[in-house]
Image (tube, coloured by chain):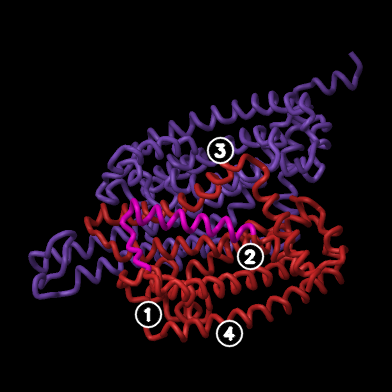
Chain colours: A red, B purple
Amino acid sequence: MNTFWRTFKVAAWLGWEMDSNWTEPWLFMVYSVVKPIAGAFILVLMYTVFAVIGNRQDPAAFSYMYVGNSFFIFVGSVLFGTFQVIQSDREWYQTIRYVYISPISYYVYIVGRAVSKVGVAAFAVAITLVFGVAFLGVEVHMTLDAVPLFVASMILGLAVLLAIGICLGGVSFLTAKHSHGLAEGIPGIFYVFCGVLFPLSILPPWGQAIGQAIPLTYWFDITRRLIAPTIGVDTTLAGYSHFTIMLLLVVSSVAFFGLSILIFKTGEYFARKAGKIDMTTSY
Amino acid sequence: MSASTARRTDLRYRIGLNLHAVVGRSYPRIIGANREPSWIFFEALLPLLGIAAYVFVYQAFGSRALDAIMTSTASAPWGICGDHACLDAAEQALERAKALANTNALIASVVLGGTMVAFWLNVLWSMASQLYWEKEIGNLQLYMMAPMNRMALLGGMAVGGMVMTSMRAVSTLVAGILVFGVVFQVADPLLLLAVFFTALVALYGLGMMFASLYLLWGREAWNLSALMEEPIFFSSGFYFPIGGLYNMPGGWGRAVAIIGAFVPATFGLDALRQLTLGRTAFGGTIWIFDVQTELYILLLMAVVFLILARYSLAYLETLAKREGKLTSRHQ
């Protein structure tokens, strides 16, 4: 356990240094905020253009979309922060062979490396929400008694995300340099099917079924319920109580943790067998 | 003059050499990448989902608008038309048709933006960052020792990148038409092709210019490319007509759109949307310039960026050599 903790600490420190020490702290802060704010502004403009040309305001739909998009920052950052570790160490820094043969758990090392991304994402989420509430009229009304449940749901949601990231890491042991495709594509699945920007009812029935099978759908729903209970858009998940959703998240995080170990070990086994642990695929 | 020196200065020989370099550098991107076919799934199909999300956003807005138009209440028996109750069935039908047309045009805007996103990401990550990447993996010194013109190297990267990215762009377009039922009305296909290819040349010219700038930078290069994703998607109007940003009240939108217009995709997309949706789409009020003017601007950008790329590459190569950064890795 002591080795795991030490590995986690050192990997987290290394991840933070790699993420942030390329520039001055203030510039890193700006960099960390500009991307998510610009991402939110894409949606703001999409809404604005629709509202202007149709001469029709829909503040509830806008708030629904904005809050969902703010929390989606966690998805992109945590997933990318996790699965890109293998590819960056393997293809870019070419240090994977040295880290891999050291007497540590490579699984814990990856989780540690991702932690700095979680911290930066939390900062970006907070800034995006504050900006939305202050300047764009986003409806956020979180009460104090909702805070413990909100914290618990955040922990469970992030645990599921980290586990999914490790699963992808296991797959990326065997694939070429696809970190950008993965970075765009896998979060794209959740962007489409998890009711992040629009209610599930917009999707065709098969799409709704996929969405309801992904635990993050419930995480987005409970987060939105707790932080912005007055939005009033039908999410199609109203039949699920807070307790049911939390239970689903607990079960999913345990299940995904098990799955992440299985996929990671399988990917690692086949990569070793095929001699792909330290391959480079530059073109 | 020796025979070998005479041969090296021969124009025909030099053109042939540089054309070989273009083919040689584009080869691994066109042929080599296909030896690892998983890229088609990761780079061409998966990213479609992100675009699909934006399509569904407009469908959600459109669906809520249609609900409001078609729902009869005591105060609005013919539904809501914009910001007032519809006067009669005729106004309601007109409003419904307008909402459907606007939703289709906005979804088409997203699909077109999605095709351009593919090229912009390729420019950022496989053009601008490429020399930096080559430096990191140790290929750059080999390129620098080779006798071809550096522009031929960048040209090869651009040609290979365009071909490779076309797969994703075409997938996006096909998904837009077949899956989302987008209707394009192309009145002038030749002009459409001219705008598209001029925009691509200008875009890759910009990428070539960035590639030389990135030679001097270390990890800032990677982060700069990451920073030029969402902010450029926003300021260049990849997922909405740029006129929406340009006409925002308060003037800030205009300033952001003007900055975004330095990326050729801005005018390229505006012109492509006019050519595929018709100039009267969105009430004809949110286009920046007419197509001809935007084509001339794109032509100018293509020429300027290619010239700047040529000179900045030569200058920054010398500077990088002088500062000892040409082959320094992991800085």
**In the image shown, does B85 or A160 lie closer to the viewer?**
A160
Q: Secondary structure at mark 1?
A: loop
Say above or below: B315 vs B66: above
The part of the image, by quadrant, that contains residue B111 is: bottom left
Say above or below: A280 vs B306: below
Instruction: Say yes or no: labels 2 and 3 on the same chain.
Output: yes
Tag 2 near tag 1, CB within 8 Å: no
Query: Image point 79% across, 21% down: which residue?
Result: B10
Q: Position of residue B71 (x, y in %)?
A: 18, 74
Amino acid type, label 3: Val
Which callout, 4 or 1, points at the residue further toward the start of the chain? 1
State the quadrant of the C terminus of chain B: top right
Query: Image point 62% across, 39% down: which residue?
Result: A24
The mark found on residue B41 in the picture is 2
Label 4 belongs to which residue?
A: A251
Label 3 belongs to which residue?
A: B201
The mark found on residue A167 in the picture is none
Label 1 belongs to which residue?
A: A236
